[in-house]
Amino acid sequence: MTTKKPTRAEKKHLKQGEMDKPSKSAGRLKTKYYEFRQNNSGGSFHKPAVVVYVEALDAKHANSRAEELGIYFDGVEQGSDCSCCGDRWHAADEYYSSDTEPTEYVLEYSGWGTEKVPEAVKYRLGEEHPILLPVRKVERK
């Protein structure tokens, strides 16, 4: 688990009661990494990556951060995603969270990433630019 001092925006969210009250450890906020896997709705992938990890205080905060990065959750309803393929992105929940910061992305199949849309990136709390995760390919047994 990563602990960081909250940014101004995060303090504002906390004051407004927009997210659950996070647990504190020595004056720092406890965070998790939330995984967003992209469905190739319409047969293509879009930036920022096929898989995006977002560091956040809770699932609600992760979804808010993801939307700031251009991830959306209602593509079929809005007409931007294929109705037969389904929504490109789904909102985060605690099931797809981890206390451990991702350091690589493990592929058990041939990847979907390209130069334009990488396999996996992570966004750390308080940092606006993504970190490209190295890919390690393994064979299925």
Image (tube, helix red, strand yellow):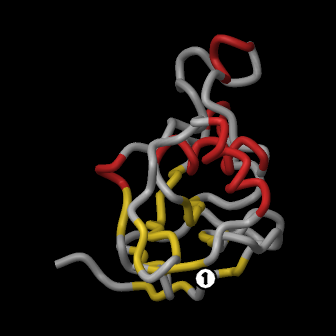
| Mark 1 Cα-neighbour bin, 10 Å: few <14, some 14–19, many ≥20 | some
Tell me which amino acid carries mark 1. Answer: Leu
Name the residue beneath numbered marker 1. Answer: 133
Q: Is residue 63 left or right of residue 110?
A: right
Q: Is residue 34 left or right of residue 121?
A: left
Q: Position of residue 75 (x, y in %)?
A: 67, 23
**Residue 117's spot in the image, x, y percent?**
75, 63
Q: SS at mark 1?
A: loop
Above or below residue 90? Residue 7 is below
Give whichever of 35, 9 is nearer the camera: 9
Vertical position of residue 113 compared to residue 83: above or below: below
Q: Position of residue 36 (x, y in %)?
A: 52, 52
In the picture, measured across the screen, residue 116 lies left or right of residue 113, that is right
Q: Where is residue 14 shown, x and y percent of the image?
A: 61, 47
User: What residue sits 59% from the left and 35% below the top?
Assistant: 18
Q: Residue at x 74, y 66 (%)?
A: 7
Q: Is residue 74 above or below residue 57?
A: above
Asked which quadrant contains residue 126, the reply is: bottom right
Q: Nearer the viewer, residue 76 or 111?
A: 76
- Determine the residue located farthest toward the left in the rendered image: 141
Looking at the rendering, which quadrant does residue 73 occupy?
A: top right
For the point 65% across and 44% down, the residue is: 15
Asked whether 117 or 75 is in front, the reply is: 75
The residue under the point 36% across, 54% down is 96
Pick the quarter of the image with the N terminus.
Answer: bottom left
